[in-house]
Amino acid sequence: MIRRCLLVQYAFERGTPATRTLRNGAPGAAAESQGSIIGCSWTEGRWPGKPVLDFKQVGDRVRFALRRQFQGGRARVRTDP
């Protein structure tokens, strides 16, 4: 039986320029699963008024922690228009 569950969901809504955190919108998300923006910068996205993170350098990333371990799983990134 395959059990699917949403662990992290980041809406990529820009806060103030000093904001370096992405709120995890997944149901029941733990506080430590909030994303920390490291190195990336905010820029205008494909659609007007929709901000995106610009990953330019090798070290640019969003870091987060999960409470439990997973074996043999896979991750999927989905970007919606």
Image: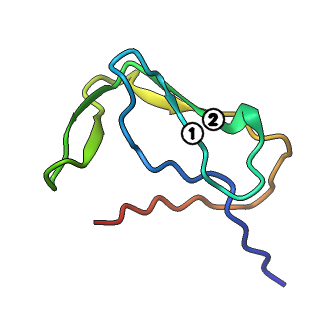
Spot occupied by residue 25 in the image (x, y as percentages of width and height): 60, 51
Q: Are marks 2 and 1 in contact (CB under 8 Å)?
A: yes
Helix, strand or loop status at disc 1: loop
Residue underneath mark 1: 23
Q: Which residue lies at the image location 61% right of the left edge and 45% below the top edge?
A: 24
Q: Which mark is residue 41?
A: none
26 relative position to 40: left or right: right
Relative horizontal placement of residue 27, taking residue 19 as reference (left or right): right
- Label whose residue precedes the other's in the sequence (2 or 1): 1
Residue beneath the point at 33% across and 19% down: 17
Distance from Cα at disc 2 to Cα at disc 1: 5 Å
The image quadrant where one finds the N terminus is bottom right
Q: Amino acid at mark 1?
A: Arg
Between 14 and 43, the one nearer to me in the picture: 14
Residue 30 at what x, y percent from top left? 77, 41
Q: Give the image location of residue 42, x and y in percent.
A: 27, 30
Colour scheme shown: rainbow
Q: Secondary structure at mark 2?
A: loop
Q: Is residue 47 left or right of residue 81?
A: left
Taking the spot 36% from the left edge, 35% from the top edge, the residue there is 14
User: Farthest residue toward the top?
Assistant: 18
Question: 38 or 17: which is nearer to us?
Answer: 17
* Mark 1 nearby-residue class (10 Å; few <14, some 14–19, many ≥20): some
Taking the image as shown, residue 21 lies to the left or right of residue 48, namely: right
- Which quarter of the rendered picture does the C terminus lie within? bottom left
Question: Which residue is at a point 63% across and 33% down the rendered structure image?
Answer: 64
Q: 67 or 75, which lies in front?
A: 67
- Where is 61 relative to 46, above or below? above
Residue placed under numbered mark 2 in the picture: 34
Say above or below: 32 vs 12. Answer: above
